[in-house]
Amino acid sequence: MMHMKFFLATTCLSLVLLCATVHAAELTLQQAVAKVEHETHGKVLSAETKHNGRQTVYRIKVLTHDGQVRVIEVPAEKN
């Protein structure tokens, strides 16, 4: 009985740590917007989150210095 409680406790702890690791490996929408602003030196017009199955992508519309509107997709998963 004690062995089973220990097994369940360690399994739960492992799942919590795994979830924390997966969550920490993802960009937030705000981080993605900051990344696009930094890389393009443009003005972000809009940003939204898109889900495709298990994959999350941030779709960010930006106005560049030369007056063009570009849509940039940033995967939530950090590389």
Image (spheres, rainbow, N blue to C red):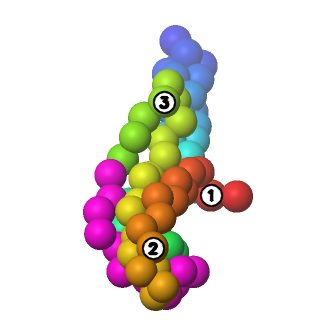
Q: Nearer the viewer, mark 3 or mark 1?
A: 3
Return the x and y of residue 7 as percentages of the image width and height.
Answer: 58, 23
Query: According to the image, label 1 marks what residue?
Result: 78
First in sequence, mark 3 or 1: give its number: 3
SS state under label 1: loop
Q: Residue at x 35, y 73 (%)?
A: 44
Contact, mark 3 vs mark 2 (Cβ under 8 Å): no
Quarter of the C terminus within the rendering: bottom right
Query: According to the image, label 2 marks what residue?
Result: 68
Q: Nearer the viewer, mark 3 or mark 2?
A: 2
- Camera sees residue 56: yes
Q: Residue at x 47, y 64 (%)?
A: 70
Query: Of residues 2 and 22, which is closer to you in this image?
Result: 22
Residue 15 badge: none
Contact, mark 3 vs mark 1 (Cβ under 8 Å): no
Return the x and y of residue 56 as percentages of the image width and height.
Answer: 48, 41
SS state under label 2: loop
The region drawn magenta spans 37-48
Mark 1 is on which residue type?
Answer: Lys
